[in-house]
Amino acid sequence: MIETVARVPTSRAATYVMGFCRHWPDRLEIDFRERQGVLHFDNAVATLTPKPNELVVTILANDIGTAEQLQVTVSAEINRFANSERPLQFDWQLGRPHAL
């Protein structure tokens, strides 16, 4: 499994997590717990975690191609909610490898 992580500077992280999770419920399985959103895609999971001055987005995917596709999708969708902060800066970093 491939993990990628972006730490996005913003003071509105919780708002973006709520907006993103409300936008996708008819398309995906979404777990929302303690302000954290977990979105289950076919071959990947995206976790959105609001922090005081940043949004942490973690993608766990079966392969690098799926991870990269989801990076584009998640970045674009969150930027739709950003309005005055747009464009938010997503600096994706490869995380630790995970066993299947």
Image: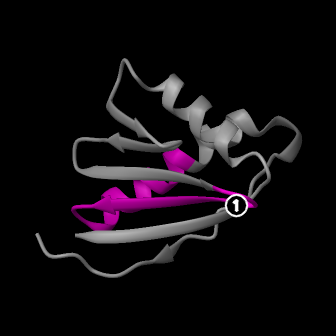
Q: Which residues are magenta?
A: 51-74
Residue drawn at x 69%, y 34% is 80
Q: Is residue 77 left or right of residue 58?
A: right
Split into 4 quadrants, where in the image is the C terminus? bottom left
- Would you call the spot at circle 1 few (<14 residues within 10 Å), some (14-19), or many (20 or more)? some
> Of helix, strand and loop, which one carries label 1?
strand
Q: Residue furthest bottom?
A: 96
For residue 25, what is the image quadrant?
top left
Residue drawn at x 43%, y 69% is 4
Q: Is residue 41 above or below residue 29?
A: below
Magenta run includes residue 32: no
Q: Residue furthest top?
A: 26
Q: Is residue 53 left or right of residue 3?
A: right
What is the number of callouts on the image? 1
Residue drawn at x 32%, y 68% is 64
In the foreground, 11 or 99: 11
Q: Is residue 3 above or below residue 38?
A: below
x then y, percent, for residue 11:
80, 52
- In this figure, which residue is indicated by the disc labeled 1? 54
Split into 4 quadrants, where in the image is the N terminus? bottom left
Q: Is residue 17 above or below residue 62?
A: above
Magenta run includes residue 64: yes
Residue drawn at x 89%, y 40% is 84
Q: Is residue 83 left or right of residue 17?
A: right
For the residue marked with disc 1, what is the amino acid? Glu
Q: Is residue 45 above or below residue 58?
A: above
